Amino acid sequence: MNDELPQRKQPAHQPATVVFNRVVIIHVTVCTDKRKPIMAAADVHQLLLSAWQAADHWRVGRYMILPDHIHLFCAPAIHDYPALARWVHFWKSWASQHWPRQTEQPVWQKSFWDTQLRRSEDYAVKWEYVRHNCVRHGYVATPEVWPYQGEMNELRWHD
């Protein structure tokens, strides 16, 4: 008898769940194709901000861009919002079409990872973990000096 569990080939993207009319906040991680270290650059940072502005059905809150992956927190911007997977696909496609160095194509891994937060403390705790990634990877001594991070929109949790 084989006691090993089957290994998931792609993440399962559960639909965002609204509970008691609370805001939905989702932590998303998107990696580059073959984990190429092509993201930590000023032009890519600006490009991603533009892509997220173009993909305005979801709002991006705090984000961290590392050389081979991105962490971001997002929330629906409209009442009848599209599925998270559709939104991520849109901005990844937009960014790929406008990518400043065509030799770096393809840019993205096929899928992404996502986790819906359950309460306001999760957002603060997850952000603290995310913002220290640049230190854990040895890019900088303190997260405050990493230039490829920010907050586009304040995502407020209403308990």
Image (cartoon, rainbow, N blue to C red):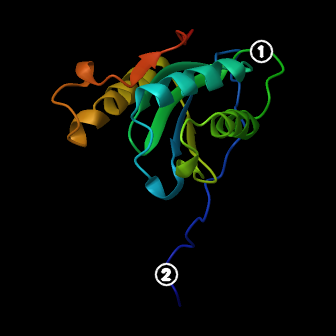
Residue located farthest toward the right when viewing the structure as drawn: 80
As drawn, 30 above or below 150? below
Instruction: Assess disc 1: are there few (<14), some (14-19) or many (≥20) residues with their C-alpha within 10 Å of its C-alpha.
Output: few
Name the residue located 39 percent from the left edge and 20 percent from the top edge.
124
Instruction: Assess disc 2: are there few (<14), some (14-19) or many (≥20) residues with their C-alpha within 10 Å of its C-alpha.
Output: few
Tag 1 secondary structure = loop
Q: Nearer the viewer, residue 123 or 44?
A: 44
- Residue 78's mark? 1
Residue located farthest toward the left when viewing the structure as drawn: 141
Q: Nearer the viewer, residue 116 or 73?
A: 73
Instruction: Tell me which amino acid carries mark 1.
Output: Ile
Instruction: Tell me which amino acid carries mark 2.
Output: Asp
Q: Nearer the viewer's eye, disc 2 or disc 1? A: 1
Name the residue located 57 percent from the left edge and 40 percent from the top edge.
114
Report the Cα–Cα distance between label 2 and label 1.
45 Å
Residue 159 lies, in percent from the top left, at: 55, 10
Q: Label 2 belongs to which residue?
A: 3
Residue 61 lies, in percent from the top left, at: 53, 18
Residue 44 lies, in percent from the top left, at: 49, 31
Q: Quadrant of residue 60?
A: top right
Does the CB distance between marks 2 and 1 fall below 8 Å? no
Name the residue located 51 percent from the left edge and 48 percent from the top edge.
32
Q: Do we see residue 24 in this rendering?
A: no
In the image, taking residue 41 as reference, residue 94 lies left or right, namely right
Q: Nearer the viewer, residue 67 or 97?
A: 97
Q: Do we see residue 129 in this rendering?
A: yes
As drawn, 75 above or below 159? below
Tag 2 secondary structure = loop
As drawn, 77 above or below 32? above
Q: Nearer the viewer, residue 22 or 149?
A: 149
Name the residue located 76 percent from the left edge and 38 percent from the top edge.
86
Residue 46 lies, in percent from the top left, at: 51, 22
